[in-house]
Amino acid sequence: MTHILVQRSDRILEIELARPGKKNAITADMYAAMSDALASADADANVHVVFLHGQADLFSSGNDVAEFLDPALRERGEGQRFVRTIAATRTPIVAAVGGVAIGVGATLLLHCDIVVASDEAQFQFPFVTLGLCPEAGSSLVLPQLAGHRRAAALMLLGEPFDAHQGRDAGMVTEVVPTAQLMARGRALATRLAAQPRDALFTTKALLRRPLADVLPGQMDAELVEFERLLTGDAARETFRAFLARRGRGA
Ligand code: COA
């Protein structure tokens, strides 16, 4: 069971994070399934848009914390393959965010093109508090969207923020009531699906071109520091404390 549901209809490839019992925490298998789905969207001339979402009240609590402590899983490199794949995906991505979007559950949104959030969504970049540093190119993209001052506060303090603050920071396109979240996300995806594909893809590529040149280098730098901090005492202690408080397993 990958906990990622993928379906295609009417030029839309839909990806659903579906592990609600674990707050949609993302495992290596889930990263792999999402990377493959994004690659299949790019390879399919009939797909014009990706629609990415969890449930109306839940997006993702980020990387599965238990897997952070498993070197064999990290060596598979699926987390890195995913963040590099989503950053390079040529197909426009619409995301619908309800509930928590934490860690990579928030940083992956920086690589989506339209982000609709429910008025109950809650975002967080908790990396520093966990003894880690930003990943997924977020140390480059967030300051670009939000400005250095606001990005520094969000990253260094690591506090949760709501959808309106997310919109002010340039991360969220539009805030809607929770009951309208999925319908609004799907309506925007449908609207993009009706646009001419070449013009759509070319425009996305041009919008992201300045970033595309520098993003891989920043991701490399983040990865070196992230891996170093991950084996440090501060990070290992916070993860152990989290897992000790709660049960493990699928
Ligand atoms: N990795 C692994 N398991 C996770 C998880 C994660 N990132 N987030 C939640 N879970 C699991 C919990 O361990 C719990 O499992 P259990 O029922 O087997 O005990 C289950 O999901 C429900 O989570 P719980 O913490 O009981 O729900 P909550 O509503 O009290 O809190 C969160 C929700 C998201 C605020 C809280 O789970 C949390 O802080 N998660 C960790 C977020 C994080 O640090 N992510 C890593 C970023 S780098």
Image (spheres, grey):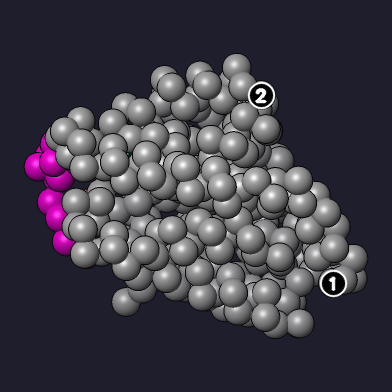
List the residue tagged with mark 1: 197
Q: Where 147 falls versus 191 (above or below)? A: above
Which of the 4 image quadrants contains residue 151? top right
Assess disc 2: are there few (<14), some (14-19) or many (≥20) residues with their C-alpha within 10 Å of its C-alpha.
Answer: few
Query: Going 68% across and 33% down the picture, which residue do you hit?
Result: 145
Side of 202 where 250 appears, left or right: left
Residue 203 location in percent, x, y? Answer: 85, 57
Side of 231 where 146 appears, left or right: right
Give SS at disc 1: helix
Q: What residue type is labelled 1?
A: Arg
Residue furthest left in the image: 244
Q: What residue type is labelled 2?
A: Gly
Which of the 4 image quadrants contains residue 88? bottom right
Position of the C terminus by quadrant:
bottom left
Q: Compare residues 167 and 125 and report the one nearer the observer.
A: 125
Cα separation between marks 1 and 2: 32 Å
Q: What stretch is highlighted in magenta?
A: 239-250
Q: Where 175 falls versus 87 (above or below)? A: above
List the residue tagged with mark 2: 147
Please indicate, yes or no, whether residue 186 appears anywhere in the rendered image.
Answer: no
Residue 13 location in percent, x, y? Answer: 64, 73
